[in-house]
Every structure is written in structure tokens, then in C-alpha cells.
Amino acid sequence: MATPLLGAHLPASGAILPGLPADVLINIQGFLKPSDIIALRQTSRALRDATLHRTVWINALRSVIDANNIFPPTFPLRQMSIAELEHAALAPRRFFTLASRRGVLPGAGKKIATVSRRAVLLKMASDLPPTDAINAASIRLLPGGRYLIAHTHHVIHLYDLGYSLSPVISTTPIFTLRKSDLTDVDVGNGSLWFMSQYRSADNLHSKALFLYISVSYHPSGIKPTSLVIYKIEDLGGDPKGSQIAHLTMPRPRMLCRIASADGNRVAFYTGQNIGVWDFTKGTLAMWKNQPMSDLCLLSRGNVICHHEDGLAVYIVPRLHAVPDMLEENTLSPAIQLELRHSTDSKRSVICRLSDGSQFFDIRYENTVTRYIVQDLPPNITNVSVIPLKIGAFTTHQKNSREEVSYLPGARICDDGVFTGLSSLSSLQLHLSPRPFVKDGQALDATITLLDSKDPGYNPETS
């Protein structure tokens, strides 16, 4: 007598799923991507009903927020309808699919047809001088597309563009920080301020935003430079701001910029010096470095810099209380990596992924080389991270007659990293692969969002 096959009397898996309790089906969908939930919906009526639970799409959107580094206050999950939750959760995949179908390299990117147009005329405070205008380079759209930061010579405005598809956009700032509001910092005539970085709170449910600001003087070196950490809370309600820390250099210096942050520590550079400041403890370390670009990445007790000889990894020395007269130490890099075209290269972007890992791009002309910050096992070396090259790609068609500017920041969207490119003739978006593509089918394409034929395109303000 033949032995029956194991599982021969079990129903097919497709027959099991519809009979499972609703709470089990909800939990199962928590492991699926939003597009997979839609695929599940199309299998049967019973499973379709299971995908229409509000909890399913709250969990799905939370996963999208985390995976794509979306600013948490962008979506008020408890206030959104099921349709809004579903639309928002599917948005990264929807745009990525559209862009990947239209994008092409090498050569000029194809233009995506305009689906809808919403013009935003940002309102400014009425008491500001006419010369204090917003320009495109000063605008930062926080990941998620709801909140926008605009920076001028005298104010930093925070706008709420909304999260729904309503054609009406509020153009009045929900919060304004004036340069004169900064305390214990010299912001008199001749002072210049610059918001070099911003960061949302590490807590996924927090509604706080941190601004990293430097204040210097022109001409440089006549007065001390200051660094300021400013916190804006309750963005979804009644935003309130407070200055939580400041650091004034003990003697006049050149321009100083906060380049990256890791928890309560920030890395900054000024001239040929690198510094790490713990703004909660009020401690600091500074050391001399070769002339460098603006890549100064703080990661797990190390600082990765890009200078004329290549990439250097420093071990952050012990931080001390800020003395009255700070003396820089000479610190040799723990790791030195030589690069081609290093002296002419420019840093493009630094990205931090949801799992805490980081990568950065170094651009030379129209070619970008990507490096991932790789953790090192303990007891192997004194450093805890090392930059590893993981690929290179072309961002745009080389054209010596036209200068291409890289728009500030990058946006991580589902399967790709989007980098903005602007020129006199077009506004483009380059899609490049994440560092952890597993199937070998990484996207590398450029699309055109606007060009000189579009009545809404202005290279100065778009």
C-alpha cells in the first residue's frame, strides 16, 4: 500500500486564507508591501474585504514612512480616511513606476506629462525689505512633500502645503524664525546666517524638527562664528520653537558649516578645521585637516571627510568642555583612500536610511560615485566604519555649453534615490539605485519634469 503524501489532505493555501480570523489577516498584511496588499485584494471577495480595514492601511503607511525616511508629521494617520491612507502608501511605488517607464540614459530624459499643476506663491512677512526674497537654492522640501522650509537673509519660514489632493494650498507660514530671535549670538549688521542641515526627531511619532544654523560675518574673520541648534515642536498643531543650544567660536574664523548630525552630536567644518560638538553636554573636539569639500560625515564615533588627497576617516577624539581659547590639535586619519579627480570633485548628497545606515555620493562632472558607510566588526581596527565604493553612474548627458546645478538634498523613494538637476533649459530628476539592490535590476534613469517650453519653468525659482 502506497504511503500517502504529507499534506495531501490539507486544503490549498488559497483556501485557507479566506477562512482565517480578521485579526490574523490584518497581521499578515503587516508583512506585505502596499502593492502586495492590492494584489491580495484582487484574489477573492473575502480577501478584498480584509484589505479594506483601516488598521491595514495605517500599518502600511507607517512602513512606507519608515522605509522612505518620510518626515513623520507629514501624515496625521488617525485623521486620514482609508482612501487617503491607501493613496499615500502607494504614492512612492506609483511615481517610481511612472518615472522608470519614462526615464532613459544615456541621452536626454523624456518628459513626464503634467497630470495636474498647483502653483505656490510663498508669502513673506510684510515688514521685510524687498531684497529679502526667497530663491530656489534656499528651499528645502521635507521628505513626504507636506512641509517646506524657505530661508532668506533675515527669516526662516516653515510652510504646511497639506497632505491631501486639495487644489488649495495655504501659502502663509505656520512658523517663522527671525535671525533676531536667536539668543546669545551676535546677529548685528553684517551678520550672515545659513541653515545647513535639518533633521526630524529620531522618534517615529515625534512632531519635532531640528534646524542646524551657522551665523558668521562678512568679511569673514572679523567676528566669531556661532553654531545654533533650534527645535520646532508640534508641527501638526500650534508650532512652537526654542533655541536649545549654541556654540560661539572663541576667536574670529572663516565661514563655519554644520555638515552632518548623529544623535546629539554634529560635525562641522571651518576652513581647514573639523569639529565635533555634543550640543547636550556642551563638549567639543577640533582638529586640523587639509583643505576639503563640504563632505564631513559623522558616523559612530568617526568622521569621514573628502579632501584633495581623497577620503579620510578620523576617529573622533575625546570631547572636552569648550575652553575660552580653543587650540586645534593635529590628528592623522586612521584610514586614507585615494580617489581619482579628487581635487575637482564635489559632494552631491548624504543619505541616512531607515535602518541607520548611510551612504554618500561624490560627483565629478556628470559622473557620480556612490559609497556606503560600512560598519566594521569590533577588534579588527580602531575605526568602526569605512566607506566602500558600491557603484558609479551618469546623472545627465554631458554638455559643455550648459552648466548643470545639483538641487539641494535627495529623496529616497521606494526603490530609488532621486537627485534634482537644474539648468537654463530644464529641470530634471535622476533616479539611481539604492546601495542594497539585490536582484541586479537597478534603475538608472533621468526624467525631465519641466523644460524651457513649459510656461511654468523659471530656472531661478522652479
Image: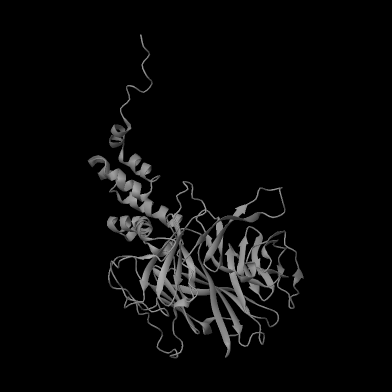
Residue 120: which quarter of the image? bottom left
Residue 458 appears in the figure: yes
Residue located farthest toward the left when viewing the structure as drawn? 45
* Position of residue 266 measured from the top left corner of the image (x, y, whole percent): 61, 67
* Position of residue 66 measured from the top left corner of the image (x, y, whole percent): 45, 55
In the image, what residue occupies the spot 31% across and 78% down? 455
Q: In this view, does 304 lie to the left or right of 113?
A: right
In the rendered view, tell whether residue 71 sits above or below residue 130. Answer: above
Q: In which quarter of the image is the C terminus?
A: bottom left
Residue 261: which quarter of the image? bottom right
* Position of residue 33 measured from the top left corner of the image (x, y, whole percent): 38, 48
In the image, what residue occupies the spot 31% across and 57% down? 87
297 or 456: nearer the eye? 456
Q: Quadrant of the N terminus?
A: top left
In the image, what residue occupies the spot 34% across and 49% down? 35
66 or 238: nearer the eye? 66
